[in-house]
Amino acid sequence: MGVVMGAPKNIVFFIVDDMSPDTGAYGNPVIKTPNLDALAEDGTLFSQAFATTASCSASRSVVLTGLHNHANGQYGHQHDFHGFESWLKVRGLPILLEESGYRTAQIGKLHVAPQEVYRFQNYIKWNSRETVGMAHSCEEFIASEDDRPFFLYFATSDPHRGGGVDKASPYKPDLFGNLQKGKSRPGHERVDYPLEDVIVPPFLSDTPETRAELSHYYTSISRIDQGVGKLIEILKKAGKWEDTLFVFTADHGMAFAGAKTTVYEPGLRVPFIVRQPYLKERPKWNHAMISHVDITPSLLDFAGGYDVEKAFTKHLDSRKLGPQRPGDNHGPKSYDRFHGRSWLPILAESEPKGWDEIGASHTFHEIQMYYPMRVLRDRRYKLIWNVAHGQPYPFASDLWAASSWQAQWKKGLDAPYGSTTVDGYINRPQFELFRVATDPTESINLADDPDHASVLEDMKKRLKKLQLDTGDPWALKWKYE
């Protein structure tokens, strides 16, 4: 059921930018993703996979460390004046794999810093909107006769907003990386979607503007799918496919207000497909609740550098984590454990026991967007603590400009926005409690419902414990706010 002893243990980690579980395999009958669907049929599809934060840099730092943001130091965007970086004493996945005997390479979007924490041996350059070209650029690295196993971190900029302008659009420019209608990026086949065919999720308002943006989003995802197919083709050509763990996921959910930068389900739910080549029994669906903190320990487990029982890697050696000052009792004092655990032992199961809860958080996106939130979610309920309640919810610059949001914003605060209103989206209460088992769209806040008072208190207690266990300094807010 596990990894074959002595076999090569190559790893491809394919991460996309701002994508919800929108593939055919995940139940979308409109979107064309034949390569991802085939990967799901040949691997394990996680139905309950979550980002720990719906912000690009912050999420990627969790992916590459196995630590929540308050423990790795990267709370928000790394680029430009935002300037968030992980603490120097944190040691990222590529460094840990290198020490386990791997050759490592990165292509596309990295968006984390500093290099001392996230250093790769090879940096492969290509346009991160052209996934087929990215795959071709990795062929030499993949096919190398080097005896060492390889780790390839393959990160697209699709389907993130930004780049490309479709002047022919009757609504807003195409900001999902698509060229003008009818034109394809090199190596790609253009796939367009009629506005009437796209599926509008419940958290969005069904407007022409929303449908236009979703159509562009779908086209961008189809381009990703073609890159997946080309990369698999290259792995097979090199004779490496049957010796390569292939993981596909997204940093967080789609780039629409109500998803990205929020801790609502559309922001945290991500696609997650794993093909473990040495696993003979591969049930298509796995319903374990996993999150991004589980990725680093899982990949290290596959590589042989992780102790499942003790939940640490041999390289960590109780190193100090973060800026430590005399008398500073906040945050974890040692870096000998991850916040996640390996899902490698449960890949052959559909209903594994003990995977029934995840924690999530958000503090920054862009530096001007301070709005800390903390989350505990289990199979039945989800608690959101809006630490900065009382101030209006801040917008990422791309989401504020989105035509799907602007169309409703201009109608006034009482205008509908998905299952809430414009005002309800901007002004949030201190606590939001949803019975997600029966209210998956998070439409009914039960935090003030007397019948759920005991549930609220239990969830608060468990959330606080999670914060304390992972050294979250925002746990102090329970005492004085």
Image (spheres, rainbow, N blue to C red):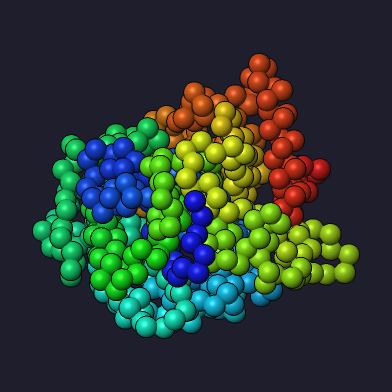
Task: Name the spot of residue 227 as percent of width and height, x first.
Answer: 27, 63
Residue at screen point 76% across, 68% down: 318
- Residue 55 relative to residue 21: left or right: right
Q: Looking at the image, which residue is at 49% across and 23% down?
A: 438
**Residue at position x 72%, y 30% in the image:** 458
Q: Quadrant of the C terminus?
A: top right
Q: Is residue 435 visible?
A: yes
Residue 29 position within the rendered picture, expressed as x and y whole percent measured from the top left: 24, 38
In-front residue for pair 63/218: 63
Q: In this orientation, does residue 260 appear?
A: no
In this view of the protein, which residue sits in the foreground, 349 or 433?
A: 349
Asked if residue 480 lies left or right of residue 42, the reply is right
Question: Residue 110, relative to residue 168: is it above or below?
Answer: below
The percent coordinates of residue 154 (x first, y second) are 39, 67
Single out the residue that lies furthest toward the front.
Answer: 5
Q: Quadrant of residue 184?
A: bottom left
- Residue placed furthest toward the left: 182
Q: Is residue 115 left or right of residue 40?
A: right
